[in-house]
Amino acid sequence: MPTALEALRRELEDAAAHLGRPHDLRFKPMFGGLMAWLDEKPCAWLGVDGMALKLAPADQPALLRLAGASRLVARPGAPPSRHYIVLPAALSRDTVQLSGWLQKTAAAKHR
């Protein structure tokens, strides 16, 4: 696994541990990155663009207002994701803030 993906995985694991839920998080290699699930629901994509969280539409605007946040584009030419938001690098390294966003992901009812 590339070093960058290992670092992102550790950051997400730290956030899950901060929530007291490290055993509810799992990963699977997929399409050159890692897909993460929390409570058996997809919650994050870890890839070359960084960490993207799957958020409910109501939670997305607040995250998108942060400098460096953007909608995930899965591959060149693909439309931006309606659900996954790429986090600013500083946020993914901030365990407390990341755990808050991870909690929002876990609480969302995704289609």
Image (tube, rainbow, N blue to C red):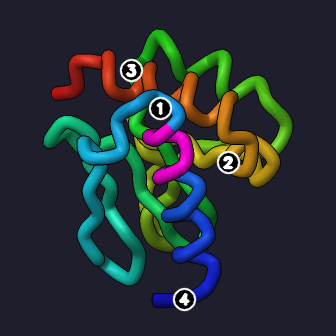
**Mark 2 or mark 4, earlier in chain:** 4
Q: Amino acid at mark 4?
A: Pro
**Mark 3 or mark 2, earlier in chain:** 3
| Residue 68 on image: x %, y % | 80, 45
Picture quadrant of residue 56: top left
**Mark 1 or mark 2, earlier in chain:** 2
Query: Between tags 3 and 1, which lies in front?
Result: 1
| Residue 111 on image: x %, y % | 16, 28
- Secondary structure of the magenta portion, mostly? helix
- Quarter the N terminus occupies: bottom left
Q: Which contiguous range is marked in magenta?
A: 13-17
Q: Secondary structure at mark 4?
A: loop
Per the rendering, the mark at residue 102 is 1
Q: Nearer the viewer, residue 18 or 101?
A: 18
**Mark 3 or mark 1, earlier in chain:** 3
Per the rendering, the mark at residue 92 is 2
Q: Secondary structure at mark 2?
A: helix
Q: Residues within 10 Å of mark 1 (few under 14, many from 20)?
A: many
Q: Which residue corresponds to mark 4?
A: 2
Q: Which residue corresponds to mark 3?
A: 56
Picture quadrant of residue 97: top right
